[in-house]
Image (cartoon, helix red, strand yellow):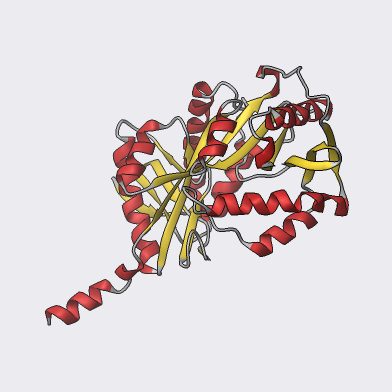
Amino acid sequence: MKFQNMEPRHVKEALALALEEYGIECTKCPQLIKRSFEKELEAIIQRLFRNKYGKVAVENGKVIGYLAFEEPRDGFHGNVKGAFSPLGGSAFAGDNRDMLASKLLQEVTADLVADGICSFALSRYAHDEEVGRSLVMNGFGIRCSDAIMKLSFRTKISDFNEDIRFQELVKDDKKEISRLKKELIKHLCSAPTFFPANIAHYDNWFENDRIRVFVAKENNRVIGYMSLDTEAETFVSESDNIYNICGAYVDKEYRNKGIAQQLLEHLCEISEREGKEYLGVDCETLNPTALRFWGKYFENYTYGYARRIDERVLGYDKYLENEWN
């Protein structure tokens, strides 16, 4: 087995591996969209293969695996430079896929760390236990997930609280959820999630015309909300026949009264009326509240694996050389 830099001539073989992995995930995740996504995956691979950080594994003249990262960015899961490998940014074949994933990680992360990059994350299929286990053994932990619901599969809720009114907020009216949005940010910053929010991102969220906000109201007071977007973080979630939930919160005083379930059913009905067949959601798996709720209705098809290395390792070889001399 040899490891080589990514080149355009490798794209066709890498695409075949990516399509095979998606097909396998479809057999294990019944609610996943059953189509090839060939065009989308090819675009992802071509884009990543133009970058610096990635390798292909070649055996007997054939590509049997690849791992590629996007260009690094500052402040990625901490005050360090980090890099992300999206869904479709890696694929592994053969009888020893766990070993292949580990070796490709070793090759690629060596280049990343050499350039001062200390945080890495990968999006991988949730049901690929072999590669998932390999990532965990290489120091990665699961941080987030993407999940999907086929609307025709759901058990519909018929019992709606007559005192609750559901409404879509538009334009400046979206800021009616500001109080709940701030409560969500506080919740995510607390134990056990410890997920800091970017306040600039918070302000821009209300100005994004693509995001739609739906609320539950009692006596004209907003007591919960869910928001929809046509985009999310995987090629699956950007299909024409899916909406994606990009935020949700219910006032603490109204928990355990079925408000979130009713909001979700309201969004399902709207999605169906507008011709969608699927609903997606991504959440921090570190957030047990979100994990429990979404897990009742959605099926995970990805996990986001993350590793933050000790930045003191940067330049450590020179330190050792000086000390030993």
297 or 120, which is in the foreground?
297
How many marks are shown on the rendered structure? 0
216 or 294, which is in the foreground?
216
User: At 71% across and 48% down in the image, what residue appears?
Assistant: 180
97 or 10, which is in the foreground?
97
**On the image, which quarter does residue 262 sit in?**
top right
105 lies above or below 291: below
Q: In the image, residue 292 lies at what x, y percent? A: 54, 32
User: At 29% across and 40% down in the image, what residue appears?
Assistant: 99
User: At 77% across and 55% down in the image, what residue appears?
Assistant: 206
State whether residue 61 appears in this view: no
Q: Residue furthest toward the left?
A: 325
Q: In the image, residue 235 lies at what x, y percent? A: 62, 41
User: At 51% across and 37% down in the image, what residue appears?
Assistant: 302
Q: In the image, residue 96 lies at what x, y percent? A: 29, 34
Q: Quadrant of the C terminus?
A: bottom left
